C-alpha cells in the first residue's frame, strides 16, 4: 500500500465523520534457537512461521537457523554481538524465506544463559518484524 492510498483512505474516513487517521499494521514474529553457529530452531510463533513463508510452526521447528539467513556472515555477526553484549536491538538482517524469497527483518535478540552450568549460553530469543521484500 503506498502513501497516496493511505492519505486517500484517511480523507475518506474523515469525510464519513470517523477517525481521521489510519493505522499501518506491522507484521511481527518471535522465535527461539540454540545458541550455536547452526543452532536448531526450538520454537516459533505462527506469525513468525508465516513471515518466513511456512504454513505452520511445525514446518520450521528443527531447521537450522543459519539456513534462514541469506548470508551466513549475518548470523555469525549477530551471534558475536550477542556473546559480547548479551543482546542485539534494532538490527536489520537479510533473510531467506521458504522459496528463497529475500526480505529484510528488524530483529531484537537476547542471549539466554543456563544458570545451573556456569552461565553458559543456552539459547537465543528473538522478536522480529518484517521490513521489506527485495
Image (cartoon, rainbow, N blue to C red):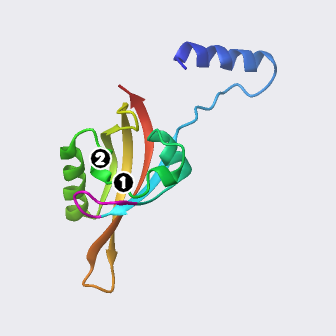
Q: Is residue 51 above or below residue 118?
A: above
Q: Is residue 122 above or below residue 24?
A: below
Would you say 78 lies left or right of 15 here?
left
The N terminus lies in which quarter of the figure?
Answer: top right
Relative depth, front residue between 92 and 13: 92
Residue with the mark numbered 1 = 63
**Mark 2 surroundings within 10 Å by alpha-carbon count, few (fewer than 14), some (14 through 19), many (20 or more):** some
**Majority secondary structure in the magenta region:** loop
Residue beneath the point at 47% across and 53% down: 30
**Mark 1 surroundings within 10 Å by alpha-carbon count, few (fewer than 14), some (14 through 19), many (20 or more):** some
Q: Is residue 28 visible?
A: no
Magenta-drawn stretch contains 19: no
Residue with the mark numbered 2 = 67
Relative depth, front residue between 7 and 73: 73
Query: Which structural element holds mark 1?
Result: loop
Relative depth, front residue between 24 and 76: 76
- The outermost residue toward the right is 17
- Rendering coords of residue 85 (x, y %): 24, 62
Label pair 1/2, CB-CB below 8 angstroms: yes
Would you say 98 lies left or right of 117 here?
right
What segment carries the magenta color? 35-41
Q: Is residue 86 above or below residue 114?
A: above
Query: Which structural element holds mark 2?
Result: helix
Would you say 102 lies left or right of 3 here?
left
Would you say 59 lies left or right of 35 here?
right
Q: Which labelled disc corresponds to residue 30?
A: none
- Rendering coords of residue 41 (x, y %): 38, 58
Amino acid at each position: 500500500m503506498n502513501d497516496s492510498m493511505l492519505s486517500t483512505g484517511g480523507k475518506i474516513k474523515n469525510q464519513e465523520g470517523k477517525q481521521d487517521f489510519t493505522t499501518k499494521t506491522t507484521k511481527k514474529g518471535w522465535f527461539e534457537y540454540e545458541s550455536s553457529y547452526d543452532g536448531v530452531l526450538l520454537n516459533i510463533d505462527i506469525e513468525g512461521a508465516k513471515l518466513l513463508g511456512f504454513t505452520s510452526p511445525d514446518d520450521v521447528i528443527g531447521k537450522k537457523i543459519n539456513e534462514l539467513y541469506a548470508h551466513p556472515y549475518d548470523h555469525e555477526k549477530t551471534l558475536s554481538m550477542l556473546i559480547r553484549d548479551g543482546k542485539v536491538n534494532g538490527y536489520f538482517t537479510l533473510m531467506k524465506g521458504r522459496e528463497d524469497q529475500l526480505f529484510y527483518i528488524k530483529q531484537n535478540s537476547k542471549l539466554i544463559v543456563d544458570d545451573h552450568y556456569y552461565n553458559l549460553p543456552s539459547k537465543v530469543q528473538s522478536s522480529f518484524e518484517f521490513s521489506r521484500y527485495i
